[in-house]
Image: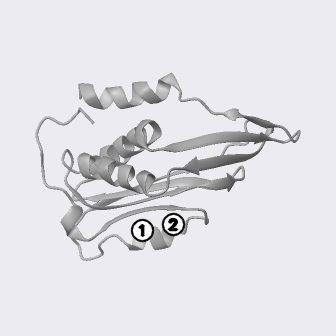
């Protein structure tokens, strides 16, 4: 991640950095409860990404990952982001397996002293997860056919590029 101008403090030692990749549905309340409740931050921003039905044609989205490497890469992304914005902690959970339309795929929560840092950090983490975390998606269609593996979009690369220019 090239966007950093100078290093800052990592959250690695703060004990409130959660990164998980799992097949099970995400328990949002449990994930958010892993962040501090001691008054050390003033903002908690969360993002949840859901599986779309793609205008009724998608039966499920199959998500594969590289075990161990996916968690490690997500952790590196979050730690790098924490050098740019002062985070009190984060919780990041990504699912794998067969995801049905309407089910959650990813949850990102960032805690910081101020809302702008929490918003920007959560957005930046999501943008870089889309391009740098080792996940692969394949569509399973309602007509019973299995689509090709989904290619990365140019818009994903453009989203990460904006962080290099800020």
With respect to residue 117, does 56 lie above or below? above
Question: Can the viewer see residue 7?
Answer: yes
Q: Which of 17/86 is in front?
A: 17
Residue for point 44% across, 35% down:
131
* Relative side of 35 to 157, left or right: left
- The local crowd at label 2, few if under 14, some if 14 to 19, many if 20 or more residues have their Cα within 10 Å, is some
The image quarter containing residue 43 is bottom left
Q: Which of 68/152 is in front?
A: 68
Name the quadrant of the C terminus.
top left
* Relative side of 148 to 111, left or right: right
Residue for point 60% across, 62% down:
23
Between marks 1 and 2, how big is the CA–CA gap? 6 Å
Q: Which residue is mark 2?
A: 28
Q: x and y percent of residue 71 in the render?
A: 41, 56
Q: Which residue is mark 1?
A: 32
With respect to residue 148, does 83 lie above or below? below
Name the quadrant of the N terminus.
top left
* Relative side of 138 to 134, left or right: right
Q: x and y percent of residue 157 in the render?
A: 42, 27
Question: Callout 1: helix, strand or loop?
Answer: helix
Please say if the residues under marks 1 and 2 sit with CB atoms less than 8 Å apart: yes
């Amino acid at each position: 991640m090239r966007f950093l101008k100078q290093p800052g403090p990592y959250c690695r030692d703060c004990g409130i950095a959660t990164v998980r990749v799992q097949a099970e549905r995400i328990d949002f309340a449990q994930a958010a409860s892993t962040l501090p409740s001691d008054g050390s931050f003033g903002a908690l921003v969360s993002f949840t990404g859901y599986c779309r039905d793609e205008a009724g044609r998608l039966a499920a989205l199959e998500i594969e990952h590289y075990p161990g490497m996916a968690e490690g890469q997500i952790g590196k992304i979050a730690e790098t982001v924490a050098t740019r914005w002062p985070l009190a902690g984060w919780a990041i959970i990504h699912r794998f397996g067969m995801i049905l339309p309407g089910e959650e795929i990813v949850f990102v929560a960032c805690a910081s002293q101020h809302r702008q840092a929490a918003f920007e950090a959560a957005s930046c983490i999501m943008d870089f997860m889309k391009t740098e975390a080792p996940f692969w998606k394949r569509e399973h269609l309602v007509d019973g056919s299995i689509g090709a593996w989904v290619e990365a979009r140019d818009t994903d690369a453009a989203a990460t590029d904006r962080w290099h220019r800020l």
